[in-house]
Structures are given as structure tokens and as C-alpha cells.
Amino acid sequence: MKIQTLCKLVTFTLAILAIAACVTQKAEQPSYSADSLTIDGAISETAAHFIPRLEANAKLALVHFDAPSGRLADYVFEELWTRFEDSQKFVMVDRRNLERIDAEVKRQYESGKVDDNLMVSITKQFGAEILVFGQITSLGNEYRITVYATDVELASSSQRAFTVRPNNRLASLLNASAEDEVERAVSQMARALGQPTTVAVGRIAYADTQTVSNLSAWLRNSIISSSQKHRDKIQVASDAESSDFAVASRGLTVETPIVNSSVQAVVTGSFSPLDSGAEVSLQLISTSGSRMVISSERFFIPASELERRKLTLLPEKDNAIITLAEFETKQQAVVPYSGSNNRWAFTVTPDVLDGIYYENDYMTLRIYSERDCYFRIIHVDVNGVTQVIYPLSPNDNNFIRAGETRRIPDNTRYRMTAPFGEEMILVSGYERPFTAGQGGGTDSLSADSVTRGLVVESDNRTAMSPVVTAKFSYTILSR
């Protein structure tokens, strides 16, 4: 009797525990929208919505979606392409003609809006009558897929949006490794090139600044490594070729074609924080006078990938990542050197295209001026200490003639040493000569010190403000 009672008690207890576990599991599961679909369901519903509504026998161009991962963008593109093609209702535009449309659409996403009029203009160039494109964005624990269909002739656009809930397929599409994403981006660039092209890898910087970090260096090396798999299309420029191009192009600011340069295209880009990870945007740009964007790629690197490789968005100082507040203060302080109020073309450019130096490297810089002027160079080190480095004596020739490019230093060498991190070169130009070495002492970087430092004393003892300014930043990394 006691044994039977004990068995019943055990059975009852186990039942209670099972119910409790079930309730706990349900409580831990995230709730999803009632109308949410799987990624495949959303693709099917998109095709079912648009195929019967779009004009039969129209020439249809479908471009890659803007998505959190390149693998997801590729999957949605291929699945939708198959459904539109299998309907046998449309004439699909040759995929080789989609690359430039794709690049221009992505540029619109990067600018923050999708402009129907521009979409129409771009698509007409390639004979398409309907353009289908879209984006996939995060909604916390769900995603939203928005699809646009633009009728080129009517200049009208319709859209359809669906909420997508996570499943195993979506997870696998989102969890691509950083190497996979770079490889995919380089593959797309190779597809966009019609012939073998010498490509240099330029500056890949933080947000809309010139700041580079070890993430910049990792991306550059990964792009070069991935390019080796596409040697039939991409021939990576040597360090010497990249250096020559950096000087000739003055940081890609010149709009005229670069003469006598072997570099035919440049990869540039940016990255910014997103969900504790990094959103990367890369562009393959022609070095011809048009500066045409040949291909534009975007992808996401999760925080776990950054942490595994010890990659940082912002540069380090004293073996620690600088704070965002310190970074923004430093950027704001040098705004007077942005060149926004220049009276003529005036640039300063380092001899490395990517803005990265390693320990014991030597740096030279080039100053260009459209008109005659006198110039002064200020160096800002990792710790924010500013110091005039040219001219320092009456023997330093700080006069530059119109149309001339001056190489600095001309009487010494600048060697890169610890501490590692971001440094800056600030240059100001004046219409009259000034006292050599004026302001030659050190000062802490601040908006006040920069503003004061802009004013110099001319040789006739009058205060003088610059008429042109320029700057660049670079990062020193340990080998």
C-alpha cells in the first residue's frame, strides 16, 4: 500500500514538473506577429502578389535586395528570379546588365531613400520596363521584407511588405562568417567587371569620417585575399602602384582622369555600428573621369565575429579602444580644417591609399594648391597633442606655386612609432608669408586651440587667417 502511494506521488510530481517545464518553455519563446511568415513564405507571397499584376511580356529587371547579410540577399534574389522566370510571363533582363542598376539602387539605399524617378532613369538605360527591388530590415526578433515594383513607362511604383519570423533557414542565411561576406562582395565586384582590371584597395573608414582601424586593415587584407580567386577579372595593384595612385588622385578628390596610372578602379568603403556589430558598405569605383560606381556591396559583421578576431570599429590608444565621446570630440575639434570655405582647390594626401601605417613605416605627404600660397603643417598625435612640424626654421620653404604638388618632408623623415592609434595632419594656407615657426610649441587638441592656431603673424606684424585648409587622418598599427 505504501509502495503504491509512493508511486502515485512520484507520477503526480513528474506530471507537475512536465507541465511546469512546458509552461516555462512557452514563456521563454518569443512571440511573433499573427500575420508573420517564414522567409520562403514571404517570397512566395511576393511572387503571387506581383506576377498577376505586372504587364505581360514586359522586360523585367530584378536586382539584389538590401539585407542584413549578403547570403540572405542572394537567396531572396535567386528565389524571386526563379519564380518570375518560371511564370513565363516576362522577358528577364540579362543578368550581366543588372550590375550597374544594382549598384545605383544600393547607392539610393545608402542615401536613405528610394527615388522612383532615379530608378526609372537608371532602368531605362538598360531597356527594362519593370524594375523589382527591395529591402529586408530588422524588427527586433522579426524582420520585414519590403518589395517595390516600378513601371518605367508609367513612372509609377507599387509595394508590398511582409513580416518574417525567424526559422532555421533564415538563421543559416543570416549567420554567414565575415570571410564569407567579403568573398561574396568580391565575387559580385568581379561579375560587374567586363574585362581584367587593375584594382587598388583604398580607405575603408568609420562612418563618414576618414578614421581607419584594425577592422579597416582586416577588410583590406580579406578583399585582397578573396581577389586571388578572381584573377581573370581582378588584378590587385601593387603597393607601389597604390602609392603612386594615392598621390596622383589626391585622395580621389580630383574629377579629371588620372594620367599615367595603372590603377583602373578602386575599392573604397565605410563601416558603422549596427546591433553591436558592424555594417560594411563597399564600392568599386572607376578611376576614369566619370568616377562611375561599378559595383556596390553591403553586408553585416556580427559582434561575435568582431570579438573573435579582436577587431574594433574605432582605433585603439594605449591598447584600449578610444571612447566614442573622445573620438567625436577629436573630430569636432578639427572641423576648421575641413576645407569647406576654401577659395580654391587645396589638398593634402598621404602616400598610402588606405590610410594605414605600421610600426617603423615612413610617411610622406603631398600638398597641392591651385594658386600660389604659403602653408603650415600641424601634426596631431595619438594623445591629441598638436605641434607645428613645418615650417620650423627659415630654411624651410613653405611657399607652393599654383598647380604645384609639394612633397613633405623635404629635409627629414617621418617615422611611425608607438603609441599606436589615430593621428592627423592639418594644413592651412595663407596669401602672405608669415613668421617661420610661429606657434611651434605643443598644445592639447581642442576646438579653442585649433581656432587660435589658425591665426598666424605675418612678416609685417599683422594677424592673418588662412584662406584655405585641408586635413587627413591615418592610423598606426603594430606589426
Image (cartoon, rainbow, N blue to C red):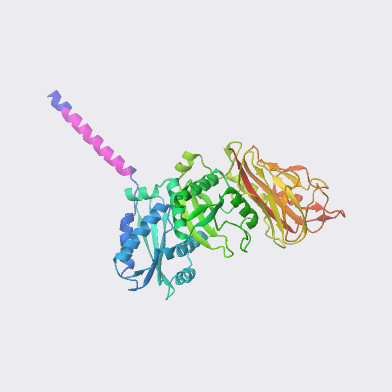
Q: Residue furthest bottom?
A: 154
Whether residue 220 is visible here, answered yes or no, is yes
Residue 362's place in the image compared with 75, above or below, is above
Task: State the residue at coordinates (32%, 65%).
Answer: 85
Quarter location, residue 383: top right
Residue 155's place in the image compared with 138, above or below, is below
Q: Position of residue 304 (x, y in %)?
A: 45, 42
Q: Residue furthest left?
A: 1
Task: State the residue at coordinates (55%, 53%).
Answer: 200
What is the chief secondary structure element of the magenta stretch?
helix
Q: Is residue 162 left or right of residue 249?
A: left
Q: Residue furthest right?
A: 460
Q: Position of residue 270 (x, y in %)?
A: 54, 52
Q: Is residue 199 left or right of residue 30?
A: right
Closer-to-camera residue (106/276):
106
The C terminus: image quadrant: top right
Magenta span contains residue 25: yes
Quarter location, residue 381: top right
Magenta stretch bounds: 7-27
Q: Position of residue 261 (x, y in %)?
A: 60, 57
Q: Position of residue 171 (x, y in %)?
A: 36, 48
